[in-house]
Image: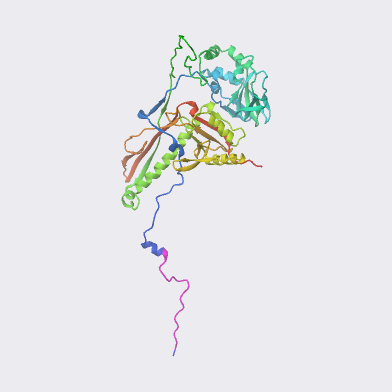
Amino acid sequence: MTTETSPQPDATAPSSLSTDAARNLATTTKTVPQMQGITSRWLLRTLPWVEVKGGTYRVNRRLTHTVGDGRIEFVQDGATVRVVPRELGELALLRGFDDLDVLTALADRCVQRDFRAGEVLAERGTPAGQIHLIAHGRIHRTTVGKYDDEVRVSVLADGDRFGEAALLDDGAVWDHTVTAETAGTLLVLSRADFAAVLDGAPDLRAHVERFRALPAQRQNKHGEAEIALSSGHTGEVGLATTFVDYALAPREYELSVAQTVLRVHTRVADLYNGPMNQTEEQLRLTVEALRERQEHEMINNREFGLLHNVDFKQRLQPHSGAPTPDDLDELLCRRRGTRVFLAHPRTIAAIGRGFNAAGLYPTHVDLGGQQVPAWRGVPILPCNKIPISPEGTSSILAMRTGEENQGVVGLRQTGLPEEYEPGLSVRFMGIDEQAIISYLVSTYYSAAVLVPDALGVLENVQITRRRD
């Protein structure tokens, strides 16, 4: 009699239905398509939007007599630096003068001077006989305060200048001591060289004479034509008469556009719409990308972008490179009613380090139900569209907003044909021979600064950590 034994079960064989096989009969739970490029877009959320019918927005201002005061650009050939001749027109004295031959003659007489960190470039109280154009580097200006201590007046950097009044005033003296913070290069144009070119250029002499006559037109501290008023009088005195003059060529902002063509195959749209509508999801992500591009353009576009439309008198330099509470205070004091700071997230981290080093901690304010850091009650909002230079520097924007406050406003036009969102339309373009549906997705936008002090910037903010 033989005894049969059952084979031992294989320990590696499955004893139940596998999960991989079970999933063939199961319904999965899906998310909508995710997108890493979506940001908070605080600029688009905080700007008041103005309806622009006709596609153009005109900013009317009072007539001003202020001229020039722009930033100067240079060209570099190895270690040799030369000012671009037409850039000399950014000087108040030469604004509007367009004779290229004369401007070239002035540029040729500019002498290059390299300076080192700590070098005194001008001493307070000494004769001033030249203008200095800063090609590269940082300098600071100091003077003697009320209590005989040295106080810092301002910080200047690439494209700035000092000593412009010395070109026409034989008795000019330096009212500040100018000291280099870093090594750099500047170009010097002496009063004697300017006079030599002036003697041989009748058109330039006539232009300078017209410039000399400008101060005779009374103006306020902003350069606007003064409104004559009478006050403090008694009895029957003759009252001042006046009128408010307007700028004859106000700036006009045309709406810019960001567009793309979204293409969806009819087979996808017909057969694969459950549980999510493929066309709607494609459109949602396309709109997100367009809004991201819109915010980037409103920050960086050379025509209407905020970084390129800050008035030169509203451009500040940090006192020590890294952002400090003192720097933010100086940025705040340049305008009334600042509503918001905008900075790159890495810059906000550098601001936090500056506060911690000073033993201060920023408060938080509620903005749309979200707690955000603030300084002096002004929210500091992240905007990753503000660029960071290869040297590790960035900018901090401060702005007042709204038409009623003469601030910064966003521009758009609503009521577009086939409008999908305010100022954004999705228009059906047809189906081609490959059965592909096309949609034209367009958004129209711009930004306007109503008066110069509505927008300011702290430039060249060092956001990288220093090595100890």
Residue at horizontal 43 percent and vertical 49 percent from the top: 34
The answer to whether residue 23 is left or right of residue 144 is left
Quadrant (top left/top right/bottom left/bottom right) for the N terminus? bottom left
Residue 10 horizontal/vertical position (percent): 46, 74
Q: Does 193 lie within the magenta span?
A: no
Residue 46 horizontal/vertical position (percent): 44, 36
Residue at horizontal 40 percent and vertical 68 percent from the top: 17
Q: Is residue 216 visible?
A: yes
The answer to whether residue 228 is left or right of residue 192 is left
Quadrant (top left/top right/bottom left/bottom right) for the C terminus? top right
How many circles with numbers are drawn on the protein?
0
Measured along the vertical axis of the image, is residue 71 above or below residue 360? Answer: above
- Helix, strand or loop: magenta stretch: loop
Measured along the vertical axis of the image, is residue 460 above or below residue 226? Answer: below
Residue 127 horizontal/vertical position (percent): 67, 18
Depth check, front residue: 228 or 283: 228
Q: Does 13 lie within the magenta span?
A: yes
Residue 244 horizontal/vertical position (percent): 44, 17
Depth check, front residue: 51 or 445: 51
The answer to whether residue 102 is left or right of residue 26 is right
Q: Quadrant of residue 414?
A: top left
What are the residue bounds of the magenta stretch? 2-19
Q: Is residue 459 visible?
A: no
Q: Quadrant of residue 464?
A: top right
| Outermost front residue | 235
Color encoding of the figure: rainbow
